[in-house]
Image (cartoon, rainbow, N blue to C red):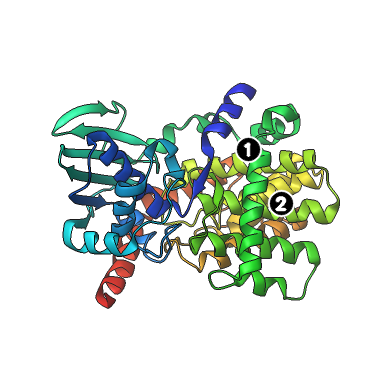
């Protein structure tokens, strides 16, 4: 068990530069161009509705671009697909005027409204003097399932099914339960999770940048000025500030969790503030982050990579709440109670796209997580059988997943259509 959970943790925790919506299309653009070689002459992008929606209101690092079309072009001209979700890390001084004109004259985008599979679907064709390279990225932001050059298939993932809504249901983490994560985080040798130090450093750096430069809507800075218990306020402030910076296109990587940078932030940064406030050791912090990330990955495997439910508000809140229980030295029963309190209070929070307002959701997630864990410590919990709350944490999480998919698939499509239609009418 320990070896596989560690493998899952390592696979699902990775640096990501920029919001994973536009970064995923930049990655696909870079991969398609690298497949065929040469200089792009024409680019065609087909995007699932969620990736399109999640890119409308965020800035691509190193540029001033929002949306999906220009970032795809940026990836094709300047990106390095070998860097995965840090595809634009080596980019320097992109010619924005050229990219803007190229996108207008030689690039096109369509939304694949009929895609009902689990998560991401991005199909990019890049035409150069050498012909046409095509890459399909699906189900995870950096998972290439098809690579073609001039119509010849170079690689095709045999496990990919275009309309498979149960992909994450077969994720290895689904073989475990919440109690397994709790025990693992307490017992795993510290050296095995030392790599989580990078998550702490990267995500805290983003938070400090967001605070210092008052980026985005400056929610982090404003929350820091509110009255309240210092540790609680700082946890909310740091979470918001890191999102402020990331949604504004700060040229700093986040440590993502379950392929989401904001989720990685929301499931770690509040614990940094709480550990500092309580005088906890670095080991205690890393074990708390370890549990937080495993809980987050677990819930994401139920609701999907892209979902009508906000993973920052729910998955990361569950992670932070469980991690805070561990930080406080509470027993497993408090983790169960914390899950009940979080799901019973904010379960079903909508994901209306990546945007500056995500900072408020991260702050809310941190606050609910802290309150839920402290209430659990006092013995207060939403009772079993109360609304979404079931008779174990695992059953509660499973029900939430079923509500997200298939329950909210049509609602998600309707919401995406409303947001995209509104924004397209303004352009």
Q: Which mark is residue 300?
A: none
Of residue 363 and residue 143, the one placed in the foreground of this image is: 143
Q: Quadrant of residue 330?
A: top right
Q: Is residue 240 visible?
A: yes
Quarter of the picture holding the C terminus: bottom left
Q: Is residue 1 visible?
A: no
Q: Is residue 353 left or right of residue 312?
A: left
Image location of residue 115, percent across then percent down: 25, 48
Q: Is residue 136 left or right of residue 269?
A: left
N-term mark: 2 or 1? 1
Of residue 74 and residue 5, the one placed in the foreground of this image is: 74
* Label 2 residue SS: helix
Task: Kindly identify which residue carries mark 2.
Answer: 271
Image location of residue 48, percent across then percent down: 29, 52
Task: Kindly identify which residue carries mark 1.
Answer: 178
Q: Is residue 297 left or right of residue 321?
A: left
Task: Tell me which residue sits at (73%, 66%) in the image.
Answer: 233
Image location of residue 17, percent across then percent down: 49, 49
* Crowdedness near tag 2: few (<14), some (14–19) or many (≥20) residues, C-alpha within 10 Å: many
Image location of residue 118, percent across then percent down: 35, 43
Label 2 – label 1 distance at C-alpha: 19 Å
Quarter of the picture holding the N terminus: top right
- Image depth: mark 2 or mark 1 in front: 2
Task: Tell me which residue sits at (71%, 32%) in the image.
Answer: 183
Q: Quadrant of residue 100?
A: bottom left
């Amino acid at each position: 068990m320990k070896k596989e959970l560690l493998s899952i943790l390592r696979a699902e925790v990775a640096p990501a530069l920029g919001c994973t919506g536009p970064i995923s299309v930049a990655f696909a653009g870079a991969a398609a161009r690298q497949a065929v070689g040469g200089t792009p002459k024409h680019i065609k992008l087909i995007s699932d509705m969620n990736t399109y929606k999640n890119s409308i209101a965020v800035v691509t690092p190193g540029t001033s671009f929002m949306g999906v079309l220009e970032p795809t072009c940026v990836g094709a001209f300047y990106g390095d697909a070998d860097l995965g979700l840090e595809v634009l890390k080596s980019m320097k001084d992109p010619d924005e005027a050229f990219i803007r004109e190229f996108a207008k004259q030689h690039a096109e985008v369509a939304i694949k409204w009929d895609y009902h599979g689990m998560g991401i679907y991005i199909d990019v064709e890049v035409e150069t003097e050498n012909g046409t390279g095509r890459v399909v990225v699906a189900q995870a932001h950096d998972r290439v399932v098809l690579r073609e050059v001039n119509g010849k298939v170079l690689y095709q993932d045999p496990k990919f099914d275009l309309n498979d809504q149960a992909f994450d249901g077969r994720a290895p983490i689904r073989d475990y339960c919440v109690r397994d994560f709790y025990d693992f985080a307490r017992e795993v040798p510290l050296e095995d999770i030392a790599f989580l130090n990078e998550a702490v450093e990267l995500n805290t750096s983003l938070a400090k940048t967001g605070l210092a430069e008052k980026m985005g809507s400056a929610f982090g800075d404003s929350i820091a000025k509110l009255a309240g218990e210092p540790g609680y306020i700082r946890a909310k402030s740091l979470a918001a500030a890191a999102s402020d910076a990331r949604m504004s296109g700060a040229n700093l990587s986040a440590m993502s969790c379950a392929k989401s940078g904001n989720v990685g932030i929301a499931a770690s940064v509040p614990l940094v503030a709480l550990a500092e406030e309580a005088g906890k050791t670095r080991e205690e912090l890393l074990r708390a982050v370890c549990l937080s990330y495993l809980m987050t990955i677990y819930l994401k495997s139920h609701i999907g990579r892209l979902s009508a439910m906000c993973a920052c508000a729910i998955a990361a809140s569950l992670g932070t709440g469980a991690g805070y229980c561990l930080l406080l030295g509470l027993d497993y029963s408090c983790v169960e109670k914390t899950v009940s309190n979080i799901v019973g209070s904010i379960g079903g929070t909508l994901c209306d796209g990546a945007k500056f307002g995500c900072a408020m959701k991260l702050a809310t997630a941190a606050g609910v997580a802290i309150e839920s864990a402290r209430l659990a410590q006092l013995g207060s919990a939403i009772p079993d059988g109360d609304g979404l709350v079931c008779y174990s944490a695992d059953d509660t999480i499973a029900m939430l997943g079923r509500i997200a998919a298939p329950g909210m698939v049509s609602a998600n499509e309707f919401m995406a259509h409303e947001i995209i239609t509104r924004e397209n009418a303004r352009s």
